[in-house]
Amino acid sequence: QVQLVESGGGLVQAGGSLRLSCATSGLIVSNNDMGWYHQAPGKQRELVATITAGGRPLYPESVKGRFIISRDNAKNTVYLQMNSLKPEDAGVYYCNALVQINIPLYSWGQGTQVTVSS
């Protein structure tokens, strides 16, 4: 059974940083494309970072230069370093394995809440 457990969210001021973690079980992150999704209040979940099975990061323009996705293969964990946070970055962050770069594979975990104060 695949489990995805996000953590690391919290309250930060605009311009601050957070590092999110996605601890997984039942999959090997280095064998999968992995992604982080952001769901702002009242909005659709959107992909904000991808790391391919080969280790290549991909970002949309909205976060490029601010967010960094990485992984620790030994820990089977994916990270999202978020810098220069903006109020619009607030919301719940989820991770998932991906097919064809942007299609989520598994049921969503609980996510981790990010609150950005101004």
Image (cartoon, helix red, strand yellow):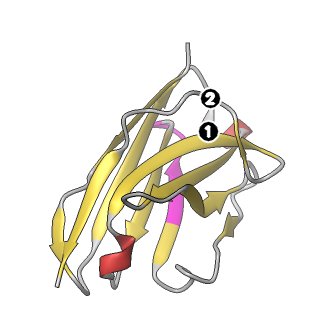
Is residue 74 covered in magenta?
A: yes
Q: Which numbered disc flags the more N-terminal residue, 2 or 1?
A: 1
- Residue carrying label 2: 106
Mark identifier at residue 83? none
Q: Is residue 108 left or right of residue 118?
A: right
Characterize the local packing of mark 1: few (<14), some (14-19) or many (20 or more) Cα atoms within 10 angstroms: many
Q: The N terminus lies in which quarter of the figure?
A: top right
Q: Is residue 40 above or below residue 59?
A: above
Query: Helix, strand or loop at disc 2?
Result: loop
67, above or below 65, in the image: above
Q: Amino acid at mark 1?
A: Val
**Residue 34, x across and y down, in percent:** 63, 47
User: Which of the image's four quarters has the C terminus?
Assistant: bottom left
The residue at which mark 1 appears reads as 29
Q: Amino acid at mark 2?
A: Tyr
Q: Residue at x 44, y 32 (%)?
A: 109
Q: Which residues are magenta?
A: 69-75
The Cα atoms of the two marked residues, 2 and 1, are separated by 13 Å
